[in-house]
Amino acid sequence: MHGVALLLVALLGVGASSRGVDPSLASHYTGASGTFACLDGSSAIAWERVNDNYCDCKDGSDEPGTPACYNGTFYCANKGSEPRTLSSSFVDDGVCDCCDGTDEPSGCANTCLEAGRAAFEALQSRVVTVAEGIIAKEAATKAHAYAWARRDDRLKALDVVIPGKEAEVEALKIKRERAREDHTIKMQLEARQRQREAPIRAAAAEAARVAAEEAAAAAAAAAAEGEVKERESEEERGRRIASQWTADPAAAGDKQEGQQEQQEQQQEEQETLYDEDGEPLSERARARANQTDWEQFAEFVGVLRKYFWSWGDWMKMVAKEGIRNDLTRRRQGDNSQGSYIEELMKTRHRNKEEQRQAAVNRARMEEWDFGPNEEFFPLAGKCISSEEGTWQTELCMFHMAHQLDTSMDIDYPEAHVLLGWWKGFGEGHRTAGFDQGGACTLPNGDESQRSITASLECGPTELLSQLSVPDAFKTDRPCTYTATLATPMVCCTAEHAALAAQLAVATRERAELQARLSVSDSGGTGAAPTVVDAGEAAPEVAVELEAGVESDGTAAESGVKDEL
């Protein structure tokens, strides 16, 4: 009996001495050696002096369950909710600070089921989120597998493309020089041809001038001859009229013959006054019909003279037009040749630019860090944006980060703020950095450059959130922005397994706590509190895990499904 009593006293002593101890430090509070070593190593005391409401250690580690030490701490287990660490001054002060009531000797109800409900549901949601992120990561990886395979092929192809482009550029240089030489030779030949043709053109122009003058002289001679003939006809006509009034046969001729001739003349005059349809002729036609042969011949000579002068002018025009056309043709030839050379230059520039860009891309693809397993390759060239107020923030992975003030015209430079150019990933690929951004003024007036660091977390889709704009007067890094970037590319089975194990423990603790409270209430303290069963939302999580993520065989993941 005496031995049993000593054992009970020892057990109660250990229990009392371990009150308020953090489980991570439990190995220091076993009392196995009968002594306790202060955690700061300053001294060692007898085990009985632990939690005796007297502070022996300078760091207060000997009084985790009493308020004796001002610098001591008290650990609230809060099973069914979240653990919490208090200052020892809150212990035994009559106020319930721990939801499990362990900071006070009595009088505190256990409220951890309700207090931990939000955290438990958040843990459930987080497990589902990570599971969905793993599924999205696998889908993105498969979608970019072909592109990743092509990267190696492209790098190999560039080794062939770049020398080929250089050879093509050199060939274009030679072709351009040949084109210039051909153009020069062509211009020289055309100049010589024009020199040879110049006398021929001058002779043609002179011949045209001489022909025009000869035509004019011939027309003048014909006109003079017509005037003589006209005068002779008038004298003959006078003699014929005089013979009609005399009896001289020689003057008049045969009377009857004269009368017959007069009748024929009158009939001819009457016929000329009407056209073939019997319609009267116009004044101009009637005047022409009444013209004598001499008048008609004089009119013909005038027309011929105008024609010869027009022909001379036409010959001069032909000569001028020939020269003009020749110049135009030569100019067009120059332009076409120049356009050909210009096109060669443009092609050469395009090839050089393609060669330069190919070399840059090759260097980037070899130097950029896409993660240990190239898992960040699907993010290359992808931009993730968020809006807060009038500001739109955008992070373009492996490129740049910037902001846009949507309240301003996009063409205004003031609407754009460069946050930085791609710097790279941080340690463990859990952050992404951009630096060397736009100018930023420090509180002392000095100039610096903006930068932004994004913390990466697992999520089913890319989402930029929690953007923090630095206050130049409240931070030691006034030009550094921070944000959180959710992406499936950082989701991993290890994180999921850890969360699943944590969820299994929380589920078990809440179920045990609910059962204990139910038993306590049924013992006479009243009806059991109305709470939601700890595993009520868990089946949905189990379905998500089984549907989206393959089990990795860990005990933690199996345990979570067993609990659910």
Image: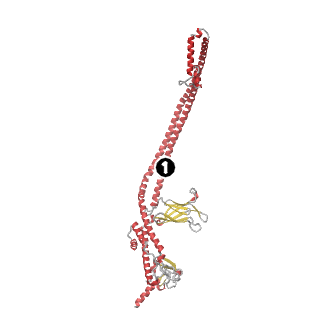
Give the residue at the far front of this rendering. Answer: 278
User: Could you tell me residue 21's position as x and y percent?
Assistant: 47, 80
Kindly indicate the quadrant of the structure image that contains residue 323. top right
User: Could you tell me residue 261's position as x and y percent?
Assistant: 56, 14
Q: Is residue 1 visible?
A: yes
Residue at 47 percent across and 63 percent down: it is: 462
User: Could you tell me residue 26's position as x and y percent?
Assistant: 45, 79
| Element assignment for label 1 | helix
Residue nearest the observer in this picture, 225 or 335: 225
User: In the rendered image of this protein, does residue 198 appear above or below residue 92?
Assistant: above
Kindly indicate the quadrant of the structure image that contains residue 1. bottom left
Circle 1 Cα neighbour tier, 10 Å, few/some/many (<14 / 14–19 / ≥20): some
Q: Count every numbered label the image shows and give the total.
A: 1
Q: Amino acid at mark 1?
A: Arg
Q: Is 72 displayed left or right of 535 in the figure?
A: right
Q: Which residue is mark 1?
A: 350
Give the residue at the far left of this rendering. Answer: 553
User: Could you tell me residue 74's position as x and y percent?
Assistant: 50, 80
What colour scheme has been applied to the protein in the rendered image?
A: secondary structure
